[in-house]
Amino acid sequence: MKKILLLFALTALCGSLPAQNTGSGNSASRYEKRSYPHYQGEISVAFGVGVGEASQLINTNRIVLETVHGARINPYLFVGAGLGYTYYYSLLADYDLPEGIDDSSGMLPVFADFKGYYPVSNRFALYMAFDFGAAMGVSGLAEGTEFYTALGPGITLGNRAKGVCGDFGIRFQHMGTGTNAFLFRIGLNF
């Protein structure tokens, strides 16, 4: 395990080192305007369509708010930590419940976030994101702590050197036994 972590650290370090520029100055990189590593933050909102075993019995659709903050190591790698709130609404909508029964639930995921970017141009980049951590029940019917993972592709639109960018993605989210979902995310990077 130590060898894998060391290899990952060396790969991240080597990928963030600048290449030697032997040209006359006309061969400037399109990423030269931004120094690496640097801070990167994002905030997003998502709608999740529940899939899996539990969604056959109860409504596991959800609304998700997330914020992630970390370091853009180089143009191709981001490492950060995130905090979110996942709201399950009308879990028992298919059952006739008496008035006044709260059938919602709130989970608080805390996770590590890794993104691999493929910059297509200064204004457009594709990425693959991987999150893992824990999700704790904080309201309604949610109880206990569950393992949390999310994986999926996305795109970033806008010029990062000049400010805020748009972020669009799809993620497969696993949070507890049978409570999986496909998330459709929209957000901002800064």
Image (cartoon, helix red, strand yellow):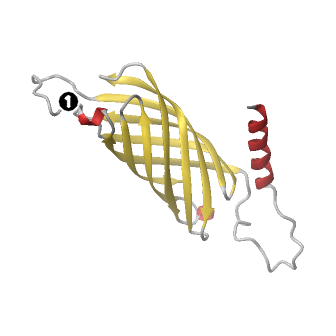
In the rendered view, would you say 72 is above or below 101? below
The residue positioned 50% from the left and 60% from the top of the image is 155
What percent of the width, then of the height, locates residue 76?
A: 66, 57
Quadrant (top left/top right/bottom left/bottom right) for the N terminus: top right
The residue positioned 31% from the left and 34% from the top of the image is 53
**In the depicted view, which residue is nearer to us: 112 or 172?**
172
**In the depicted view, which residue is nearer to us: 66 or 90?**
90
**In the depicted view, which residue is nearer to us: 119 or 28?**
119
Q: Amino acid at mark 1?
A: Leu
User: Which residue is at the far top?
Assistant: 144
Residue 190 visible, this angle? no
**Splitting the image into 4 quarters, where does residue 2 fall?**
top right
What percent of the width, then of the height, locates residue 153?
A: 50, 55
Secondary structure at numbered mark 1? loop
**Splitting the image into 4 quarters, where does residue 33 fall?**
bottom right
- What residue is disc 1 on? 92
Q: Is residue 104 left or right of residue 155?
A: left
The residue positioned 25% from the left and 36% from the top of the image is 56
Q: Is residue 61 left or right of residue 110?
A: left
Disc 1 crowd, CA 10 A, few/some/many (<14, 14-19, 20+): some
In the rendered view, would you say 112 is above or below 163? above
What percent of the width, then of the height, locates residue 131?
A: 54, 40
The residue positioned 43% from the left and 41% from the top of the image is 173
Q: Is residue 109 left or right of residue 182?
A: right
